[in-house]
Amino acid sequence: MVENPYLPIEAKVEKIIDETPNIKTFVLKPSRKVKFETGQFVQLSIPGIGEAPFTPSSSPYQTEKIEVTIMKAGLLTGKLHEMREGEIVGIRGPYGRGYPFDDFYNKEVLILGGGVGMAPLRSLLLALLENVNRFSRIVLCYGAKSPEDIVYKDAFPEWRKKRKLEILRSVDKAAPGWEETEGLVTVLLDKIEMDLRNSVGIVCGPPIMMKFGTLKLLDLGYKPESIYLSMEKNMSCGLGKCGHCALGKYYVCKDGPVFKYDLIKDIPDIWL
Amino acid sequence: MKFCINKTDWEKFLGQISKTYHIYAPQEVYGELAYQLLAPENVSNAIYDTYRAVQPLKTFFSLPQEKVTVVTPQAEKTIVLGVKNCDLKAVSVMDKIFLEGEFVDPFYKQRRETTLIVSSDCYQPKDTCFCTLLDNNPFPEGGFDLNLSPIDNGFLMEVGSSKGESFIAPIREDLKEAAPDLMEKREKKRKTAKQRVIEVNREFRTEKPFPTVVKEEYASSEWEEAAKTCVECGACTNICPSCYCFFLVDTKDEGKFPKVKFWDSCQHTGFARVAAGVNPRAKLYERLRNRYLCKYEYRPENFGIVACTGCGRCVEACQGKIDKREVIKKLEESKVET
């Protein structure tokens, strides 16, 4: 049989977890194992509705099931949010280049995440924790709009117990009971001290946060080649062919979605 | 390998093989040249030389719209006659996209494999042709299975691939090797045609090559100027022989995951739009500029091939009378010295 890269396989929605008022995590069981590297993405589809790219939020070491954390933002994500456990979606992939894990060995890994951008970062964090001895330190700075907009609320207490992992959180607008930082996620960067000669910065979040997060890291002294960005573009085919996710001469679906900043810093308007 | 064959013998051969192949050839339709199916009884209707057909060659390999749910083996074989160099070069870009990299498009691959390309020299370039501005020639230099250069009452036939070689095997014994004087005649005709393209484009010549101008003038206000008459119809991308972008759509047809792929255009507003409506190329001039950057900067960086071959179709198709040559000329002229 000829390989058809456009055709998805079935995946059963095993469980749906409400994360925030507009974000849900879907636990999917594909009909075949979908092995991915952390940071790679998959294409999820609903027949007759559409298809969109999502980066799995689960550990790459968990291969039977894939978790995808999705914010309601448009037609397809709206329909996904209406789905019930037991229903079927289509899945293709994984595609693209994920986080170059080996680059992070023996380094201080700083993770800067915003909103639902925490999804790929949870996958990364779980992978890092699995190999925690290979890294000298892991620092997670996470920001959300408000305390209720924080994803993976139940996971944080567990993560806080982990060796070598430090967690700082901020919300744009605090609510009663919030005892952590109030302000944009970038203010967290002033509260930590990293060994700049031996550290990598990883950023994922909404476009505006990606921009200011990266600029802040540069300000702190990070070199462009030590910053890793997860770029959001309109990945449609996922195969490096349809042209929708162009970023200068790159196609984000095959050359990304994870890029070292120095590779793309000279492309005009990358933050849009 | 170069041979000569007279027109009668070639047409007789075409007549014989038209039972096994669908033969498409440029034929006159309403005063234009269009690829049309060549009926066995009308094989002499094929027009080899003159200029490129209205449709780009890509239409044979990447369909405007197609279901991509199941790959069905294609039994029918196709021959496309009278293909010009601008289209051959453009298909080399399409090949890079659809046949190379980690994933191969099985639909494109199948059509490409079952199609024989018989190119021809372009003897009467149009006023919109500008291949020479991009260092291309109005005659094929590779990328064909066979090339036929009409001379006197026959053709100088050049074999360009093993596919072409097996194709002419049935008549191979009757073919005579091309004599030097025939080669000279071809050279002369080619020179004349090239000279004509150069003449036509004298006023559009830039000091620096087109790709350099486009790259250096990224910030020019001329882009906005050029986009003033653009109506975002997408004709330029549809008619372009190397525009390959498409949209993969989930349909409501029968089947598990019915998917259709159709040509898309980077000139349309929503082409690059992402979740929640964020649009990296929201302005019309940004999209117009993107098309030039794609052709003259990005694809050359990826593949070492300038993805505009100077076929001039976009110049003819544009509803807003935007002439690429003029745009690039103006970009260079408007350059603000720093």
Image (spheres, grey):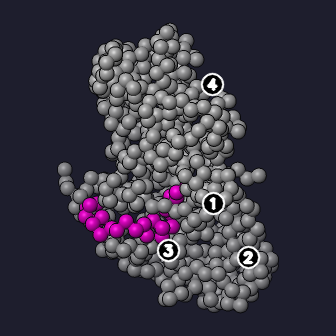
Viewer-side label of 3, 4:
4
- Determine the residue positioned at 70% across, 39% down: A31
Q: Give the spatial CA distance, label 3 vs label 1.
A: 44 Å
Describe the element under mark 4 as helix, strand or loop.
Answer: loop
**Crowd class of label 3 (few under 14; some 14 to 19; many from 20; radius 10 Å):** many
Chain letter belonging to callout 4? A
Chain letter belonging to callout 2? B
* Disc 1 residue type (three-letter): Asp
- Give the percent coordinates (x, y) of residue A218: 32, 27
The residue lying toward the viewer, choosing from A99 and B17, is: A99
Q: Which mark is residue A61?
A: 4
Q: Earlier in the sequence, mark 1 or mark 2?
A: 2
- Which image quarter: residue A201? top left
Viewer-side label of 1, 2:
1
Q: Are marks 2 and 4 in contact (CB under 8 Å)?
A: no
* Disc 4 residue type (three-letter): Tyr
- Which image quarter: residue B331? bottom left
Query: Mark 3 — residue?
Result: B138
Chain letter belonging to callout 1? B
Describe the element under mark 3 as helix, strand or loop.
Answer: loop
